[in-house]
Image: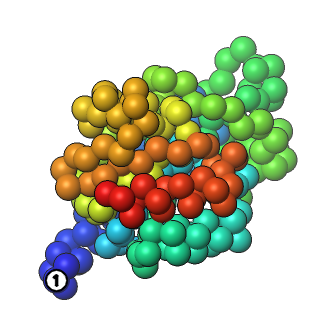
Amino acid sequence: MDESSRDQNIKSIIRLEDRVGQCSRCLSLTMCTSRPSRGKGDLEPQVFLVFECENSFTRDTNWLIELRNKIKQEFNIERVYHTFMVRCHPKACSNRQSYSCIIPGKMLGRDNICKLSRDICDGIPIKPSGEVIINCLTYLLEEMDILKPSYVVLFGKKVRDYVLKSCGGFEALQTGQPYEYKDMVFLSTVEETSLNEEEVQNLGRIIAKS
Ligand code: SF4
């Protein structure tokens, strides 16, 4: 990739992240999200990792570094980027449920302090609904179109189902085989919570054969 295409990539990702930062498609989530998750890593990625949404694993920098290193080794590549299918963080919140009426607007500041409890947010992370996933999926597809990775690794069944369906990979959904679309190869694996050395090696073997 030449210098001008790289600059173009950076500008396009910044514009995308600005729109994500101002997004209010899911009001109930933006109220309790201090800031939406962002994709991170090399902006000319060979491998693009997609997690469902942020959790204790993806927030753990050491875990992420270790995963990246394993992927680099097994895929024999250098450039990795990771991102999320849903950018805001769904939570179950007893504070919010105990109020019958809440004024719209952000309840969480950047410091993660809740305006209702005036304490650190203690919402319990939950899985995103189908509606939220559909709302947010366009950002992920746009991010892939900008960065054009060679390989896309989908973590967990929900990520696999939504992303492959939106890219026409119905056969791969049934067979679990790698799926090629727009010069990218899509691979599915388990959720990051169940990921182990063997799973990553298995992905590496599939890449070696492709
Ligand atoms: S989850 Fe995605 S679509 Fe919903 S408000 Fe956040 S950024 Fe927007």
Residue drawn at x 72%, y 14% as measured from the top left? 100
Camera-nearest residue between 92 and 4: 4
- Residue 34 seen in the current view: no
Camera-nearest residue between 148 and 170: 170
Which residue bears the numbered disc 1? 2
Image coordinates of residue 64 in percent, x first then y, are 63, 66
- Please state which amino acid type lies under the numbered disc 1: Asp
Depicted 203 relative to depicted 74: above or below: above
Image coordinates of residue 187 in percent, x first then y, are 41, 48
Q: For residue 143, which quarter of the picture? A: bottom left
Camera-nearest residue between 29 and 44: 44
Residue occupying the far top of the picture: 100
Image coordinates of residue 36 in percent, x first then y, are 53, 50
Residue drawn at x 48%, y 62% as measured from the top left? 204
Depicted 21 relative to depicted 147: above or below: above
Q: Is residue 35 left or right of residue 195?
A: left
